[in-house]
Amino acid sequence: MTEWHSYEPADGHRLPHDPLNAIVAPRPIGWVSTMSADGVANLAPYSFFNLFNYNPPIIGFSSMGWKDSVANIEATGEFVWNLVSRDLGEAMNTTAANVAADVDEFALAKLEMAASTKVKPARVAASRAQFECKLTQLIRLETKEGCELDQWLVLGEAVAIHIDAGMLEDGVYQTARAQPILRGGGPADYFEITEDALFKMRRPG
C-alpha cells in the first residue's frame, strides 16, 4: 500500500528541499539570447521553458523576477532560443551567473556569436538548433486570488529556425544526436538525452 507525503503548498512542503521542480522534470532549457536597446548582448538560461504551438511555432519561458532578458525583450520585442547540448553545458552554466546588465555573457562564457537573419540578438554559433523569435505576449503571472507575482511569462513566435544539418537523417531531426541536456530538480541536477533512452509509442486511432 502506497504511503503518501501530502501537503498544501501554502503551508510548506516539510521537506529539506522543495520537490516541485524535481517532480516536473526534466525540463528543456530556455537558453535565451537578447540585445538591450543600447546594443549590449545578453545570454541566460531558463529552466521554465517549452514549445506551446506548432503553426505558427510559439515558444515561451518564465523568469523569476524582472531580469535582463525580460527587460531586453520588452524593449526590443526580439530574442533567440539556443539548444543546449552536453558539450555546451558548462558554458550555459557560466551564463547563469548574476552579473551586471552591461556584461556580455557571450564573452563571459567564451562563446562565438552567429548573426541572426530576422532579429538583432545573436545566436550561439555552436548550438545545434536556434529559433529567432518575435515577442507575442509578455504576461505577469498571478495567484488564484489575482495577486501579481514577480514572475514573467514571455511568449514568442519563431520567425526563423536554424538546424545543424548533421542532426538530420533522411530529413528527420534526430533528437538524441544533439545530446541535449535538460534541467532536473535541486541546485545542480541535469539529465542528458541519449539514443539508448529512446522508446516509441504510436498515438492510437
Image (tube, grey):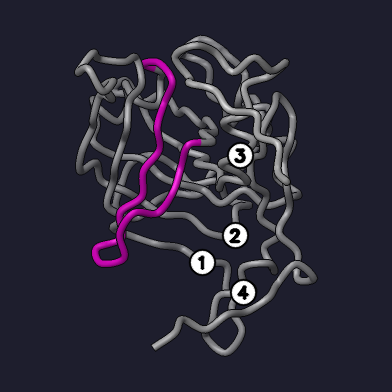
The span from disc 2 to disc 1 (Cα, nearest Å) is 6 Å
Q: Nearer the viewer, mark 3 or mark 4?
A: 3
Mark 3 / mark 4, whichever is N-terminal: 3
Q: CB under 8 Å between callouts 2 and 1?
A: yes
Q: Earlier in the sequence, mark 4 or mark 1?
A: 1
Q: Which mark is residue 163?
A: 1
Q: CA distance from mark 4 to mark 1?
A: 11 Å
- What kind of element bears circle 1? strand
In primary-sequence order, the first of circles 3 and 2 is: 3
Percent across and percent down for residue 15 are 69, 18
Q: Which residues are magenta?
A: 48-66
Q: Disc 1 marks which amino acid?
A: Ile
Of mark 4 and mark 2, the one earlier in the sequence is 2
Q: CA distance from mark 3 to mark 1?
A: 30 Å
How packed mark 3 is, by other alpha carbons closer than 10 Å (few <14, some 14-19, many 20 or more), is few
Is the residue under label 2 in contact with that under label 4 (CB below 8 Å)?
A: no
Whether residue 122 is situated above or below residue 185 in the rendered picture: below
Q: Position of residue 48 (x, y in %)?
A: 48, 36
Amino acid type at image mark 4? Gln
Q: What's the distance in space between the residues labelled 3 and 2, CA to CA?
A: 28 Å
Q: Say which residue appears at 46% left-offset and 63% top-offset.
A: 162
**Residue hosting label 2:** 128
Residue at disc 3, secondary structure:
helix
Q: Is residue 129 left or right of residue 180?
A: left
Q: Which mark is residue 23?
A: 3
Q: Which residue is mark 4?
A: 174
Q: Amino acid at mark 2?
A: Arg
